[in-house]
Amino acid sequence: NAGVTQTPKFRILKIGQSMTLQCTQDMNHNYMYWYRQDPGMGLKLIYYSVGAGITDKGEVPNGYNVSRSTTEDFPLRLELAAPSQTSVYFCASRRTSDSDTQYFGPGTRLTVL
Amino acid sequence: GDSVTQMEGPVTLSEEAFLTINCTYTATGYPSLFWYVQYPGEGLQLLLKATKADDKGSNKGFEATYRKETTSFHLEKGSVQVSDSAVYFCALGGSEKLVFGKGMKLTVNP
């Protein structure tokens, strides 16, 4: 099992550019999540999904969009990049049980200049 | 809403020192509690968890007990190693989402 994979590992964007952060899991998990991690601020939830075709906003969704057409994939889209979106982005997944562990990908480090 | 408050650090210890990282929470209902660890350059991984009051989670020499009466889930290790240098996150969950504390960076020197 590869677990949760994310691409790219690093990216530099110019203000106003767009990009998609890819996330794939091979564990057949229903739940998937996108977080951003800013220095000293812990993790903030951007969007999450409880299954294919279902997505919902987290704590900081502005400036982002997601889709979930398959169980495996949960891409995060930035339409008009802004310097405030400079961060490390983590994707995670878990099974359905309330107490289940979240499994994290290795992260994407994004810089917007 | 639900929240987690934990020691923020950074903390520097010598090898074989005793470690305690405090974590308290506010939640409705009966959440599960977690400690996640992030090693340099990596994503978070589960260190241990507890799903109900008085449960003790343990892994790699770390322990934490779910204390409902004090709403706490403090992480302890009797003798830290250099390889324990990482950022530690306390988290609570019980429905669809986890709520994380801000994380505490630990550096262990030989």
Image (tube, rainbow, N blue to C red):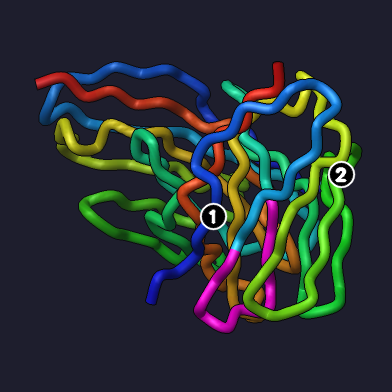
In the image, what residue occupies the spot 52% across and 67% down?
A101
Name which residue type carries label 1.
Answer: Gln
Dot 2 falls on a residue whose secondary structure is: loop
In the image, what residue occupies the spot 75% across and 68% down?
B95
Residue at numbered disc 2:
A61
Kindly indicate whether the residue at mark 1 contacts the one at mark 2 (C-beta within 8 angstroms). Answer: no
Measured from the top left, where is residue A5 in percent x and y? Answer: 50, 60
How far apart are labels 2 and 1 at the CA level? 19 Å
Measured from the top left, where is residue A13 in percent x and y? Answer: 69, 27
Neighbour class for label 1 at 10 Å: few (<14), some, many (≥20)?
Answer: many
Q: Is residue B90 left or right of residue B108?
A: right
The image quarter in which residue A44 lies:
top right
Report the chain holding disc 1.
A
Residue at numbered disc 1:
A6
Asked if the stretch drawn in magenta spans residue A73, the answer is no
Q: Is residue A104 above or below residue A59?
A: below
Measured from the top left, where is residue A111 in percent x and y? Answer: 63, 24
Q: Is residue A85 left or right of residue B34?
A: right
Q: Specify the segment rendered in magenta.
A: A24-34
Task: Using the image as rendered, state which of residue B46 and residue B31 is in the foreground.
Answer: B46
In the image, what residue occupies the spot 58% across and 67% down?
A24
Report the chain holding disc 2.
A
Q: Is residue B64 above or below residue A16?
A: below
